[in-house]
Image (cartoon, helix red, strand yellow):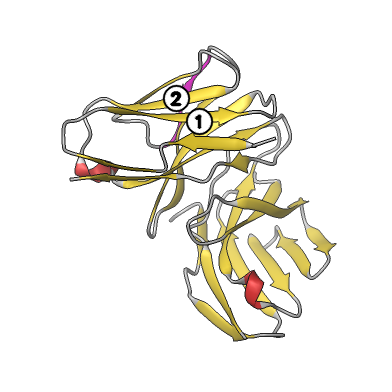
Amino acid sequence: NAGVTQTPKFRVLKTGQSMTLLCAQDMNHEYMYWYRQDPGMGLRLIHYSVGEGTTAKGEVPDGYNVSRLKKQNFLLGLESAAPSQTSVYFCASSTATYEQYFGPGTRLTVT
Amino acid sequence: QKEVEQDPGPLSVPEGAIVSLNCTYSNSAFQYFMWYRQYSRKGPELLMYTYSSGNKEDGRFTAQVDKSSKYISLFIRDSQPSDSATYLCAPTWAGTYKYIFGTGTRLKVLA
């Protein structure tokens, strides 16, 4: 039981490049989330999903897209990376209870 | 005014000390109050949570909520070097799975 895994762990992008971050969970959770964590800003919700095939915007969705084609996977895409998207990205999943399980994070640098 | 505020620290204490970590919040509709612990370069993990006002104890940890003053506290007794981490408070509403995370307080327990 791996819990929540994230791929890749680290990435460096140039401005304007695109990439996809993959989140996978093996706990059969309905809800999945993408957060970014920046110094002094805490964790901010980018997008979330309440079930397979659904997505919704969070607090800071601009510049990101998501897809949830399979229940266990939640993908976060950056179409045209900007230096302001340099951050640590965390994926989380949960059931209908209040505990969210977090992945180990992806450190992204955009130069 | 931010919805949730935490002193970022760092807070340095000697081993064995009693630690008090605090959050204030502005939304009186919050009913569940989470505390997450995040070790350096790891994802957050749920430490404990309380519902509405009152205290909840779990081993060396006690969570306290005072809804009248919109104040949340986490007390750690007999603190250990292994407690060195960032502690994030995250209040939420009933019937939702979206948190508002505080920025976190970094704690260092010195051996």
User: Disc number at residue A61?
Assistant: none
Q: Are marks 1 and 2 in contact (CB under 8 Å)?
A: yes
**Amino acid type of the residue tagged 1 in the rendering:** Cys
Q: Which residue is mark 1?
A: A23
Residue at x 55%, y 28% (from the top left corner): A24
**Residue A3 drawn at (x, y percent):** 64, 37
Position of residue A101 relative to residue A76, above or below, is below
Question: Which element is circle 2 on?
Answer: strand
Q: Main secondary structure of the magenta part?
A: loop
- Frontmost residue, A91 versus B26: A91
The reply to whether the magenta stretch includes residue B92 is no
Identify the image quadrant of residue B107.
bottom right
Position of residue B24 relative to residue A91, above or below, is below
The chain holding disc 1 is A
Q: Is residue A34 left or right of residue A70?
A: left
Position of residue B10 relative to residue A57, above or below, is below
**Residue A91 drawn at (x, y percent):** 51, 37
Identify the image quadrant of residue B71.
bottom right
Residue at x 76%, y 67% (from the top left corner): B61
Q: Residues within 10 Å of mark 1 (few under 14, many from 20)?
A: many
- Frontmost residue, A92 versus A12: A12
**Amino acid type of the residue tagged 2 in the rendering:** Leu
Of the numbered discs 1 and 2, the one sitting upstream in the chain is 1
Q: Is residue A58 left or right of residue B24?
A: left
Q: Is residue A40 left or right of residue B60?
A: left
Question: Which element is circle 1 on?
Answer: strand
Q: Which residues are magenta?
A: A54-59
Have a look at marks 1 and 2 and say if they share a chain.
yes
- Image quarter where the C terminus of chain B lies is bottom right
Position of residue A83 relative to residue B14, above or below, is above
Residue at x 20%, y 30% (from the top left corner): A17
Q: Which residue is mark 2?
A: A75
